Image (cartoon, rainbow, N blue to C red):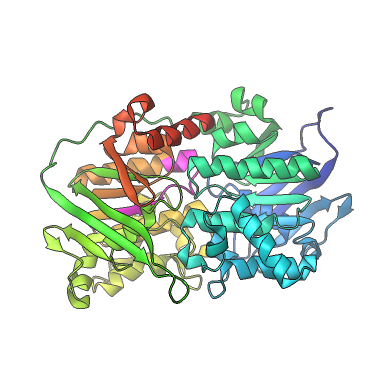
């Protein structure tokens, strides 16, 4: 399909013509005959459900396709054809990249600031002193608090949202002419989404840079993109100006995509409200200072909440507010400084390793970073089977059928079990993480942004699945999320975190009445409404 012609379309900086991608061993073609133009200074969005071919299309532009992938068609940048592998000379100065998975870019063994400084010195020729000053300015510009100190931190010491902001700072250091952003705000709360996309818009305006934006967030597309191309099954379904495609969609698939995600609000949970599964009291989490004599950082400050059987408690707040640190302390993945975490009447913080290992199957996590929680060397079916093997519940006869059943439960074709994580989209990997958690037959799931990487249609299906499992099994959910629409429709109660403290707890049905809320809650809701 050829791109829609328009007299208003700027001169193309990037042109794709009949792009077709075939992966080794695949009978299907994941991307076929895709054509589009990204004009100078233009923001062009690629949208579609998980597995539609959005990320593969972007990787073809970047020259980052999996080994053995076959590409036909033409990729033109700045009026010249780019041969496979020729993109590398354009990285940094000409083309910047923001991936969905921040940890695929950031080295785990070097401070974040050193990694940005290395790029400045390599491509910019700056002295170490000037590079470090520029790094602090870049981190501050993307909203990382106390940038001078955090520049000395390692990626694992950042929240998921802060890691994503650091990657955006890295990608924009040299003001590239084209920025390829694959779900750049998936892990960010509405306040930081607005700041980051505003920053990208400023860069485009200042240098006439173009943006190829891969996302499943249609409200975000309607606000920040100029044009949109809708992909489904690897093929273009519809393309044109955003206000035409999203308000007057012509293709049946586009109409379904636009209509997805309008879920009814859940009633306040009253059943089993006294049957507590998880009870947290005065939980405090601290991280040591990076240097000798530097004071410890308090990430969670005397937080208290309960989760009953059959109930979903959502934790919301800006990136870095302590949501993930709270979840890690509850799961005993990080040692709490003080407080109490009781699960099914037992104190978790005092258990030894043997006791904790016996209890772990009953309280399971689903992590925010789908790629980071899966071994890149392990096939998907082995990753889902791993909890069963570790817990001694694997049977060679019934095990494969159980893995296939779990994959179908989360909307995955069991045939994908033969693939490895890098061969799946981010949304598909997130569903693998949910299947791994369900394999243990838990009583509590700690869900850290479990649907942030999913498109509206798949997200609705996964949330419906989690609701169904909760009703059938009486599961309790500790649900971390920055999407206010998802929180309002999925949670029963909401706790608002700011600077490591809970400033307000309320029924989820009270979210639409911001005038009656804490000022910080009102700020979160006001920004979220701008994207609706």
Q: Is residue 68 among the parts visible in the rendering? A: no
Residue 413 pos. (x, y %): 45, 54
Residue at point 14%, 38% (across, down) = 271
Residue 153 pos. (x, y %): 51, 67
Please give the range of residues in magenta: 446-459
Residue at point 61%, 31% (across, down) = 222
Quarter in which the N terminus is drawn: top right
Q: Is residue 87 above or below residue 267?
A: below
Q: Is residue 397 among the parts visible in the rendering? A: yes
Left or right: 269 in relation to 91? left
Outermost residue, front side = 293
Q: Which quadrant of the structure image shows residue 444?
A: bottom left
Left or right: 38 in relation to 483? right
Residue at point 17%, 47% (across, down) = 309
Q: Is residue 359 above or below residue 432?
A: below
Q: As rendered, which of 15 and 300 lies closer to the eye?
A: 300
Q: Which quadrant of the structure image shows residue 121?
A: bottom right
Left or right: 375 in relation to 86? left
Indicate yes or no whether the magenta region holds residue 451: yes
- How many numbered marks, from 0 up? 0
Residue 462 pos. (x, y %): 38, 45
């Amino acid at each position: 399909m050829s791109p829609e012609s328009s007299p208003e379309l700027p001169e193309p900086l990037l042109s794709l013509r009949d792009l077709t991608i075939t992966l080794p061993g695949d009978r299907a073609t994941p991307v076929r005959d895709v054509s589009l133009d990204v004009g100078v200074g233009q923001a062009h969005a690629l949208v579609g459900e998980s597995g539609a071919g959005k990320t593969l299309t972007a990787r073809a532009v970047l020259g980052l396709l999996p080994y053995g992938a076959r590409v036909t068609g033409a990729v033109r940048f700045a009026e010249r054809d780019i041969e496979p592998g020729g993109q590398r000379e354009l990285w940094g100065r000409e083309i910047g990249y923001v991936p969905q998975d921040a940890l695929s870019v950031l080295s785990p063994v070097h401070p974040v600031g050193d990694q940005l400084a290395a790029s400045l010195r390599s491509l910019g020729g700056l002295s170490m002193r000037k590079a470090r000053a520029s790094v602090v300015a870049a981190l501050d510009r993307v909203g990382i608090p106390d940038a001078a100190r955090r520049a000395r931190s390692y990626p694992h010491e950042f929240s998921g949202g802060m890691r994503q902001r650091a990657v955006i700072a890295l990608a924009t250091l040299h003001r590239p002419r084209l920025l390829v952003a694959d779900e750049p705000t998936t892990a960010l709360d509405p306040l930081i989404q607005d700041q980051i996309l505003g920053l990208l818009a400023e860069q485009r305006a200042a240098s006439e840079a173009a943006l190829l934006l891969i996302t499943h967030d249609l409200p975000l597309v309607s606000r920040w993109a100029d044009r949109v191309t809708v992909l489904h099954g690897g093929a273009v379904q519809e393309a044109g100006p955003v206000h035409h495609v999203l308000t007057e969609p012509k293709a049946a698939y586009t109409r379904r995509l636009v209509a997805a995600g309008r879920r009814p609000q859940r009633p306040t949970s009253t059943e089993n409200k006294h049957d507590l599964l998880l009870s947290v009291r005065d939980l405090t989490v601290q991280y040591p200072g990076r240097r000798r004599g530097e004071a410890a950082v308090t990430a969670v400050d005397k937080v208290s909440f309960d989760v009953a059987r059959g109930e979903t408690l959502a934790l919301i707040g800006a990136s870095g507010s302590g949501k993930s640190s709270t979840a890690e302390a509850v799961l005993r993945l990080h040692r709490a400084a003080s407080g109490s975490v009781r699960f099914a009447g037992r104190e978790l913080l005092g258990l030894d390793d043997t006791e904790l290992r016996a209890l772990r199957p009953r309280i399971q996590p689903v992590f925010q970073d789908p790629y980071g929680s899966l071994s890149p060397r392990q096939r998907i079916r082995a990753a889902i089977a791993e909890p069963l093997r570790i817990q001694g519940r694997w049977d060679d006869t019934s095990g494969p059928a159980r893995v296939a059943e779990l994959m179908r439960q989360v909307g995955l074709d069991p045939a994908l079990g033969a693939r490895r994580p890098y061969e799946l989209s981010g949304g598909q990997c997130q569903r693998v993480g949910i299947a791994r958690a369900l394999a243990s037959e838990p009583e509590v799931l700690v869900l850290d942004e479990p649907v942030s990487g999913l498109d509206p249609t798949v997200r609705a299906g996964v949330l419906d699945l989690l609701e169904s499992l909760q009703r059938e099994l009486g599961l309790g959910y500790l649900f971390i999320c920055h999407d206010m629409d998802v929180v309002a429709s999925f949670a029963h109660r909401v706790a608002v975190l700011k600077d490591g403290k809970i400033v307000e707890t309320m029924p989820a049905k009270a979210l639409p009445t911001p005038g009656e809320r804490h000022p910080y809650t009102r700020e979160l809701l006001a920004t979220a409404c701008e994207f609706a």
